Amino acid sequence: FRSDFEPAVELSEKYSDNVYIMESLGLKCLSGGDYKKAVEYFKNGLQKDSNQTYLYYDLARAYQKLNISDKVREYFDKFTEFNPKYVKGLFDYANWLIEISDFEDARRKLEKALKIEPDNIDILNKLFFVQYTLVRKNVSEYNIREAISVSNKAKEFGKFDYNPELQEL
């Protein structure tokens, strides 16, 4: 994977102001574990061209590695604002929200993603997990009905892979 970015290093000397070169170098740093340097490249890229909104996604991922939650949220929010139909961005945002136990916001992101790709089994499974967690934390009839509805849709696809304790609704 790292060798994929070697041409960017060579080109960076000649085209140091190119936003795509900056993004490539940032991705190289991100994959190599130099997260602070990756942030610098991504921010420089945005300064050169603020229309390169996928750099917000890259920044969110870099800040996620640096464990700076407010910046992760800020850049995921910016990314999804500019790219509201990018399912992977919504899904990755939801996964991070689950990591920090913000299940309500994760549910909202997954529901948005599900509206875009209603037959995506990964989204359905993750949404069921989130709704199941919400049910366990705060039992309400609405949450139970929603969780059962999502689990039934996931079962239709035949890829419903949860431990028995997650199937006891």
Image (tube, grey):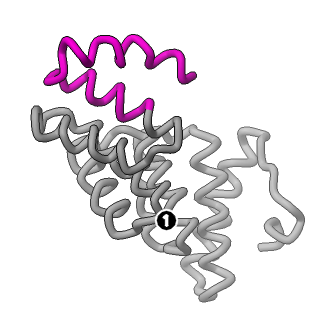
Tell me the crowding category of disc 1: few under 14, some 14 to 19, or many 20 or more residues within 10 angstroms, Cα based: many
Query: From which residue to which does the magenta span run?
Result: 1-28
Judge from the rendering whether residue 97 lies leftward or rightward of residue 168; answer left or right: left
Q: Count how many numbered circles sit on residues in the image.
A: 1
Judge from the rendering whether residue 15 lies leftward or rightward of residue 152; answer left or right: left
Query: Residue at coordinates 28% horizontally, 62% vertically from top-left?
Result: 74
Extreme residue in the front direction: 13
Q: Nearer the viewer, residue 127 or 97?
A: 97
- Does the magenta portion include 22? yes
The x, y position of residue 76, in whole percent, is 33, 54
Judge from the rendering whether residue 157 lies leftward or rightward of residue 126; answer left or right: right
The x, y position of residue 39, in whole percent, is 32, 47
- Please tell me whether residue 40 is drawn above or below residue 29 in the rendered image: below
The x, y position of residue 149, in whole percent, is 63, 61
Judge from the rendering whether residue 147 lies leftward or rightward of residue 57; answer left or right: right
Query: Residue at coordinates 33% horizontally, 40% vertically from top-left?
Result: 85
- Does the magenta portion include 42? no
- Circle 1: residue type: Leu
